[in-house]
């Protein structure tokens, strides 16, 4: 039981095991590959370490808030905006969970398809989608307590062994790529843009972390375990991407998996590293639906985003879905800046500061690094052109990342709005007293 009697009782090791396994994802690796040869190997690894540090701190802060309050992601996000925001917040979260579950299934299925074609001589992509969707659902039905037990007793150790094994296999296959001895060639990305790139994947988990953090025994243990798991795996798999993924020539995850020549063992590797991503999104739908009054068996409730994700995964590829996933992520980064500012200095009445803060942070993100969707870029570019501002700002200021400014702007606007609101109320109270 948690300190206030809630069910659960996740301690340090439970949270560490959970977030180490979730963040041990092959999806981090292509982003690491983008950092070279513009940066030297040392600079690229430093960028991965800083990104692991920042993302670990941010996810740990949200997990601690959830542990202290017992609130889910939907409840934490709705607090600064007031009771009327529950439905819009829940619908946005459900869309995110379905989108990410579909993306995780596509990532797994594409890699499994290549392995299947090489080993079995058959295109079994629909089968892989359904198989891994079923695995994610089975974990969600088992519930976080059983999953935590599985991770503690064996799952974490297998994932850690795989993390070491992936590095060893890559070394034996590709050795140390020759480009690592070259100096940085410069250009895109700069060091700060590299940090921003490496933040993309771990920050995708912002809308999920509270749904597990609320089960924690104490905010400190939850925060420490979450931070340790996120930092370790973001840094490790980011570094693997920096060093080895460009050596596959194709620079993609399926090519890397096939290149390890594990035969059907690669399918098991994909299951162990990626199925928990489907599970996390499916499970997170349960408290999201509960926040708007939907009650029922978790087996039925949790299947909602999965039913939406499966057809998407069957008919779309990564390139078609990824920009929309990153666009959704760009909305949640400033939203959690507002959540943290609100937790430190709660706004008493108006939701206006929170709305302005999220819009400001989101617009800043899209100004610096717009989602790679042509119609969206046309829409977002028009207002900047009308007032004579360059678009995108990231092209003009090559040192500038998007995630950190977006978060900081939203945090600052929320804080400023709250303090202004309090000062106005205080002045009004003094005026009334004087009369």
Image (tube, rainbow, N blue to C red):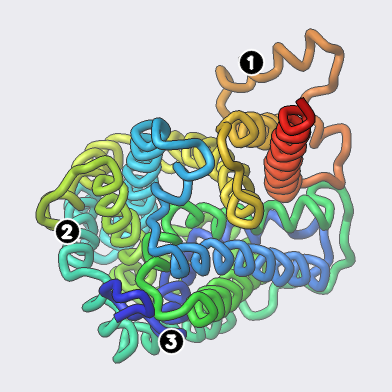
Q: Determine the CA span between mark 3 and mark 2.
A: 27 Å
Q: Residues within 10 Å of mark 3 (few under 14, many from 20)?
A: many
**Residue 124: x, y in percent?**
20, 52
Q: Residue at x 65, y 72 (%)?
A: 239
Q: Residue furthest top?
A: 386
Mark positioned earlier in the residue sequence (1 or 3): 3
Please tell me which residue lies in front, 101 or 90. 90
Q: Determine the CA span between mark 2 and mark 1.
A: 39 Å
Q: Are marks 3 and 2 in contact (CB under 8 Å)?
A: no
Q: What residue is disc 2 on?
A: 134
Residue 164 versus residue 267 in the image, above or below = below
Q: Residue at x 57, y 32 (%)?
A: 350
Q: What residue is disc 3 on?
A: 13
Image quadrant containing the N terminus: bottom left
**Residue 98: x, y in percent?**
32, 43
Q: What residue is disc 1 on?
A: 378
Residue 353, by quadrant, is top right
Residue 167 versus residue 206 in the image, above or below = below
């Amino acid at each position: 039981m948690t300190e206030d009697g809630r069910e659960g009782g996740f301690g340090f090791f439970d949270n560490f095991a959970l977030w180490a396994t979730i963040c041990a994802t092959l999806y981090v690796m292509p982003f690491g590959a983008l950092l070279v040869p513009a940066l030297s190997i040392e600079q690229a690894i430093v960028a991965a370490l800083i990104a692991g540090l920042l993302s670990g701190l941010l996810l740990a802060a949200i997990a601690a808030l959830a542990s202290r309050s017992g609130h889910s992601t939907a409840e934490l996000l709705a607090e600064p905006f007031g009771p009327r925001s529950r439905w819009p917040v829940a619908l946005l979260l459900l869309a995110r969970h379905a989108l990410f579950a579909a993306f995780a299934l596509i990532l797994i299925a594409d890699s499994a398809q290549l392995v299947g074609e090489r080993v079995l001589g058959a295109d079994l992509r629909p089968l892989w989608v359904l198989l891994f969707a079923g695995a994610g659902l089975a974990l969600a039905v088992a519930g976080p307590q059983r999953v935590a037990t599985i991770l503690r007793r064996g799952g974490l150790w297998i994932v850690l062994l795989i993390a070491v094994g992936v590095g060893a296999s890559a070394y034996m296959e590709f050795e140390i790529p020759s480009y690592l001895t070259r100096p940085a060639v410069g250009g895109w990305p700069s060091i700060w843009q590299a940090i921003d790139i490496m933040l993309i994947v771990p920050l995708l988990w912002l809308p999920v972390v509270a749904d597990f953090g609320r089960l924690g025994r104490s905010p400190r243990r939850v925060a420490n375990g979450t931070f340790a798991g996120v930092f370790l795996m973001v840094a490790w798999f980011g570094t693997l991407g920096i060093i080895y993924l460009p050596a596959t020539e194709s620079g993609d995850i399926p090519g890397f998996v096939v290149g390890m020549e594990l035969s059907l063992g690669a399918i098991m590797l994909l299951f162990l590293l990626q199925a928990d991503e489907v599970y996390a999104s499916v499970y997170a739908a349960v408290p999201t639906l509960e926040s708007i009054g939907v009650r029922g068996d978790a087996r039925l409730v949790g299947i909602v985003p999965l039913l939406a994700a499966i057809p998407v995964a069957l008919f779309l590829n990564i390139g078609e879905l990824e920009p929309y996933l990153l666009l959704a992520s760009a909305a949640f980064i400033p939203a959690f800046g507002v959540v943290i500012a609100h937790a430190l200095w709660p706004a008493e009445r108006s939701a206006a500061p929170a709305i302005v803060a999220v819009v400001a942070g989101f617009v800043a993100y899209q100004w610096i690094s717009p989602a790679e969707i042509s119609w969206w870029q046309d829409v977002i570019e028009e207002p900047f052109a009308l007032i004579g501002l360059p678009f995108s700002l990231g092209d003009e200021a090559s040192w500038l990342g998007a995630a950190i400014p977006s978060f900081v702007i939203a945090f600052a606007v929320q804080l400023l709005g709250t303090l202004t609101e309090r000062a106005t109320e205080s002045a009004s109270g003094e005026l009334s007293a004087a009369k």
